[in-house]
Amino acid sequence: MKIMEESKKSPVFMKNRELSWLKFNERVLEEGATNEVPLGERLKFIAIYQSNLTEYFMVRVGRLSDYTLLDEDNSERRTGLSPEKQLEMIFAKVRELYEKKDQVFEDLEKKFRKKNVYHLSMDELTKEEKSTVKHFYKAHIKPVLSPQIVDFHNPFPFIDNNHTHAILRLRRDGEDFFGLIPLPEGAKSIIFLNREKSRYILTEEVHAYYAPSLFKEYTVKEVALIRVTRNGDLSADDEDADDNVDYRDHMKKILKKRDRLNPVGILSDRPLSSTMSSYLEKELNLTKDQFFITHTSLDMSYAFSLEGALAERFSDSLYYKSYRPKPIGPAVYEPSLMDYIEKNDLILSYPYEDINSFLDLINEAADNDDVLSIKITIYRLADHSKLVDALCRAAEHGKNVTVLMELKARFDEEHNLINAQVLYDAGCNIVYGFDQFKVHSKVCLITYQKSNEIRTITQIGTGNYNEKTSTLYTDLSFITADPTIGQDATEFFFNICTGVLDGSYQSLLQSPYSMKPRIIELIRREADKGSEGYIFLKMNSMTDYEIMEELSEASQKGATIKLIVRGICCIIPGLEGYTENIEVRSIVGRYLEHPRIYLFGKGDDEIVYITSADLMTRNMERRVEVACPIQDPDLREFCHFYLDTQWKDNVKARRLLQNGDYVPIDDGKEPFIAQDYFMERANERYELALSGMEKEKSHKKEQPRGLFNRIIHFFRKN
């Protein structure tokens, strides 16, 4: 097999992770330029693009910057690129993307004005509006400003991570000085100028406009807004945490360090003079390549505040039509969801179905006298989490509640610390996981006694227990009373609570030990079938070196390989002699695609897993992940149907080319958006379930499993 050109060279069918991610984020930006997407949603896509890029700089650029300080060779294994070369390529691409973003934003602003929604500059305000803005500035902004002159007596101050500052170049008595004014914490991002809130100005623009008035003794030569992004790649994985320290205190120390790490980039709202840029280069220890310019807002999160102001009045023309996830739970399966799960496996598909159905199960368990314990792994939670409330109530009702709270969930560490304390105060047992391995799995186990037997209900999901993101992300949540999976889940919780990583399980796969070998084994199984081999994988990212090697070998043996990879994809598809039987597609749409479904084989030979793990080295080797087989024939058929439906998408999907570009799917068929299809059919599924249950109550003949089959066939026909 031609896996490599030469043994010491990087594979020709693999590409750089960082540049692949930038291509994905460019796809997000392209949604902001798509005419078929409502204007308000397009603005939000630009905001998401900017937020993604900021986090990318904090984490990935931050890590590469650290690597450049080390003596050892940290070249990327997949491509052989050094950290320095990767940074050079990243900065060049990001500069290009900022220009593209500004063009998209400018076009969008023109279209907003045609809808009578005006983002105004100070020069465009009416006399009355200027008076309103001036009054707002004097009453709400100026009193809390802290302007600072930088001179011999006042050194350059610390600039907070991703916080907007006005910077001024000043002159007095023939000398140059610099002034800095941070935008006040908590300041509103938008100042609305009319009752309809259709005319507005951004607070940061007002801040820049009035900044010169604060330095009355100086001649103002230059004014700009800047945001400094700092290295945020500081996690407990990289810390030398002693085994005998309080892990909560350890995480608190890490959080204090994060905002004070070295700068990795600076963004300004206009070109800076050579004097200003040279000064900032020196003070922030940056190079010219790390300076970027945008003519849009430095903080695009205002797009979400704007939605709150405009959504009701302009809902039909500016935003997606509201969609409410459908309840599948006690509302359908009365009187008891636990009773239903005893007889039938169930998959909830978010956001088409409601996470409250899972929360109903937890609340039912909290109230059920037969329930002995609830155990769960938590990675990210919503603010004011209903799950936390339910778990607290279960503990207060005498259930043994064990929560593994992952404190290394990047940027959610503090939030998880707070929730851990709330759960602890309610009487829950709190476990904090492993020093060197994040627990990223999504597993919940309910143990109860019935008819003198110990029984279990196990839930395994592809996404977090977060009520907010469950309406924004697509995910699958599998719930079963299968005793084998229940026994595996019981062993899993015993193991992680006692520090055991290499547990042995009958059905479940677990990284960092059994998952990757099993996936490789199944890839090889399909490869050995030659042209009859079939692999269909859906995930967020694909980076693992060995798995990509195995997929290349399977392709060379003739196996058909379909990959739906939303984000990073380091395998180059369609490369003759290496990956000609691999096709990669990515879907970016209204909802963030998030399920991980791994399917191997066809017909009776088909094996399907759902999991929280992407095919990335970090997930396979440095995280605790769980994959669960879907053995119920109806649910396995549903997973297959889910993948096939997404593959039919020819509007939001893009095909990955060998050069890394994503191009539209040109299949000559009627336009088809998978996410819209699932939304449109969710109501029918709900109504069908209701009518089926009513019929069953009347005739008491048809089993619920037959109902699920009818749902699948209904989807197939429609």
Image: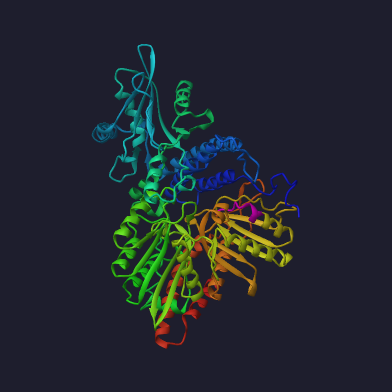
Q: Is 547 part of what is drawn in magenta? A: yes
Residue 121 visible at all? yes
Quarter of the rendering occupied by the C terminus: bottom right
Residue at the front extreme of this rendering? 244
- Residue visible at 66% across and 65% down in the picture: 534
Magenta residues span: 540-548
Reply above or below: 605 against 539. Answer: below
Question: For this rendering, which residue is in front, 562 or 552?
Answer: 552
Asked which colour scheme the image uses, the reply is rainbow
Instruction: Report x, y in % for residue 20.
Output: 59, 46
Left or right? Give the position of 706 relative to 467.
right
Left or right? Give the position of 530 relative to 540.
right
Instruction: Report x, y in % for residue 691.
Output: 42, 78
Quarter of the rendering occupied by the N terminus: bottom right
Name the image quarter holding residue 517.
bottom right
Question: For this rendering, which residue is in front, 532 or 102?
Answer: 532
Residue 116 visible at all? no
Residue at the top extreme of this rendering? 174
Instruction: Report x, y in % for residue 356.
Output: 38, 66
Q: Is 696 part of what is drawn in magenta? A: no
Instruction: Report x, y in % for residue 286.
Output: 49, 29
Question: For this rendering, which residue is in front, 374 or 116?
Answer: 374
Reply above or below: 343 against 415. Answer: below
Total numbered badges shown on the rendered structure? 0
